[in-house]
Amino acid sequence: MSLIKIMPCLDMKDGRVVKGVNFVDLKDAGDPVENAKFYQSEGADELAMLDIAATLENRKTRLEWVEKVAEVISIPLTVGGGIGSLEDIRLTLAAGASKVSMNSAAVKDPELVRNAAREFGAERITVAVDARRNPAMPSGFELVVAGGTKPVGKDAVAWARECQELGAGTILPTSMDGDGTRAGYDLEFTRAIADAVNVPVVASGGAGTLEHFYEGAVQGGAQILLAASVFHFRTFRIQEVKDYLRGRGLSVTP
């Protein structure tokens, strides 16, 4: 098994880190710069920063937030939310992001993924695949966009495979049914994506126990384990998670 990485996630709204359940009932989780500095010092391998209201509010991601966070960390920073064009990607990378994450824009214009990978490199392009369970879909999971609010009638696993073919370097699947619940990653969904692609997969949505992280890697097949609530509210320290995974026989960074 490849080296497992830990990725805290800063969900952003109105300049603050927030966290909810199933993308609603948001609670304040602090200042993004202070969180970013803390997580790097704690041993985070990467950091995600998602402007969760950008698409719903029909605006671009706030580049000033990106700049402030990028200034205080040296680990890779993935930024998503409101990124809808090659120019948006260029500006976000220039603001200090290492990678960008697209969701709604990629669904609307799949060629954006191809063109972005060609221009900036596949390793800088992540496609977020948000889904809800729907037995009418071949995989059982339907793709949703706009912060999980709009189903698009497309099979989520087939879409992940298409994104890899278009040139995406990372796939970030999130089960809207599990987000923020701390009931564990949606292992069925994560594994379906991991089996469908051969690029790194990020397990996201629902981590609540140390066992959940282990399951995300072993049963879910993810190389990167993303979590928010358990880190923001200090349920676990990052090194605690790494020590646990190491104790279960997985390879993690020091």
Image (cartoon, helix red, strand yellow):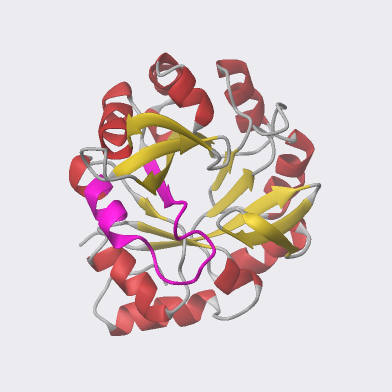
In the image shown, does 253 or 244 lie closer to the viewer? 244
Residue in view at x 64 percent, y 70 percent: 232
Q: Is residue 42 visible?
A: no
Q: Based on the displayed image, in which of its 4 quarters is residue 199 positioned?
A: top left
Q: 254 or 15: which is nearer to us?
A: 15
Q: Is residue 151 visible?
A: yes
Tell me what residue is drawn at x 49 percent, y 33 percent.
103
Q: Is residue 190 magenta?
A: yes
Task: Find residue 127 and report its image quarter.
Answer: top left
- Looking at the rendered image, the quarter that the N terminus falls into is bottom left
Please provide percent x and percent y for residue 197.
23, 40
Q: Position of residue 124 (x, y in %)?
A: 46, 34
112 vs 233, left or right, is: left
**Horizontal and vertical percent position of residue 102:** 51, 32
- The residue nearer to you, when weighing 66 against 179, is 179
Q: Which residues make up the magenta segment? A: 171-193
Verify whether residue 45 appears in magenta.
Answer: no
Residue 128 located left or right of residue 88: left
